[in-house]
Image (spheres, rainbow, N blue to C red):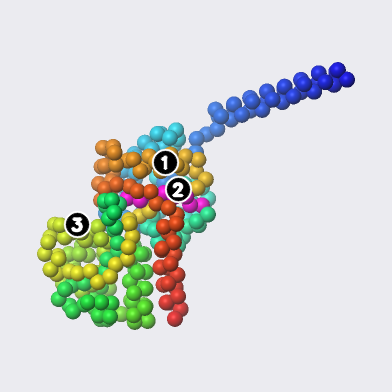
Amino acid sequence: MKTITRFSIGYLLFALYCCFFTAHAEEHISPDPVMRLGIYYPPISDNVSRADVVVSFSLWVQEQAESVGVKAADVMLFDSIEEMSEAFDSGIINIISAPPLSIALHFSRENLADGFYGIRAPGKLNSVLLLARTDKNINSIEDLRGKRLIIPEHHELAEMFLDTLILKTYHVPYKKLFSSIDLLKKDKRIVLDLFFDKADVALVNEGAFELMKELNPQLNEKIKIIASYPTKSKSYAYVNKNYPFRQKIIDNYLSMAMSVRGRQFLSLYQQDLLESCSVKELDAYDELAKEHQQLLKK
């Protein structure tokens, strides 16, 4: 009986030692998770080149990774939102940056955790604006038939917003309503073409239009807003909910405006600061997409 007792105690001590040693070893040999940011490039191609995106984001992402103890970081640009979604679901990337409607339509909420977005200033929106020339007798959506339109390229939200307005009023897709439709990349070029009477109506984001008005006050005399869709930023960023350094990464991003490099980074993308955003904010874009689909079926 004493032999059995001594054996049991010895075995228990040995087992505890093994558990401690294994846990201690895993603590030192487990690799740090790689931080990989995936960016949907086409919607931001009007403001910054592919090379500038890679260089600016790579340097800053590496700094953020090191600050939370992650030894490796990478930036991946995607030209396909479907491929980007697959990469996020499979764990190839763990942070995403894309327009909110694109995220709402193509990414599973089950994998998303709260994130952040860049804004122009506290309390300011970057809404999608439907603009019209003041000399074309355009006062509402009912006055758009047969007009000349300019729409930004790779702007899914602007296109769906406009199509929803047109479907509700005319019961036809917007592509069948206008006499001409031009796709342009740069918001600045869109506003100028509208100003110089190369189009009757156009879609741009509010931040670009406000900046153009500051540079050219005459725009107020030639151009007016006839409709808008509220959004805070052209791109939203979300983190995979299973990423172990998720909250640290978000906290670091939100404080970036306090550093010189951070302010330079935000300036490159015409933003003043970053704010946190919730996954719940994507619900508004779900509602737009749902309404659009219902109108298409009528």
Is disc 2 in contact with disc 1, using a CB cutoff of under 8 Å?
Answer: yes
Closer to us: 50 or 43: 43
In 3D space, how far apart are the residues under numbered discs 2 and 1 (Cα atoms)?
A: 9 Å
Crowding near the residue tagged with mark 2, few <14, some 14–19, many ≥20 C-alpha atoms within 10 Å: many
For marks 1 and 3, give the CA distance: 31 Å
Q: Which residue is mark 1?
A: 249
Q: Residue placed at 49% from the left, 38% from the top? A: 33
Q: Secondary structure at mark 3?
A: helix
Of residue 94 and residue 181, the one placed in the foreground of this image is 94
Query: Which circle's residue, 1 or 3, is located before the other in the chain?
Result: 3
* Disc 1 + disc 3, Cβ < 8 Å: no
Q: Residue furthest right?
A: 1
Q: Which mark is residue 239?
A: 2
Residue 171 in view of the camera = yes
Q: Which residues are magenta?
A: 111-118
**Residue at 20% from the left image edge and 64% from the top image edge:** 191
**Percent x, y of residue 242:** 52, 45
Q: Which residue is painted at 29% across and 47% down in the image?
A: 273
Mark 1 lies on a secondary structure that is helix
In this image, 52 relative to 12: left or right? left
Which residue is at a point 77% across and 21% down the rendered structure image?
A: 9
Does 218 lie within the magenta span?
no
In which quadrant of the rendered image does the N terminus lie? top right
Mark 2 vs mark 3, CA separation in Å: 31 Å
Q: Position of residue 80 (x, y in %)?
A: 42, 58
Three-letter amino acid code of the residue under disc 2: Val
Q: Given the image, on which type of amino acid does mark 3 rest?
A: Leu
Amino acid type of the residue that numbered disc 1 sits on in the rendered structure: Ile
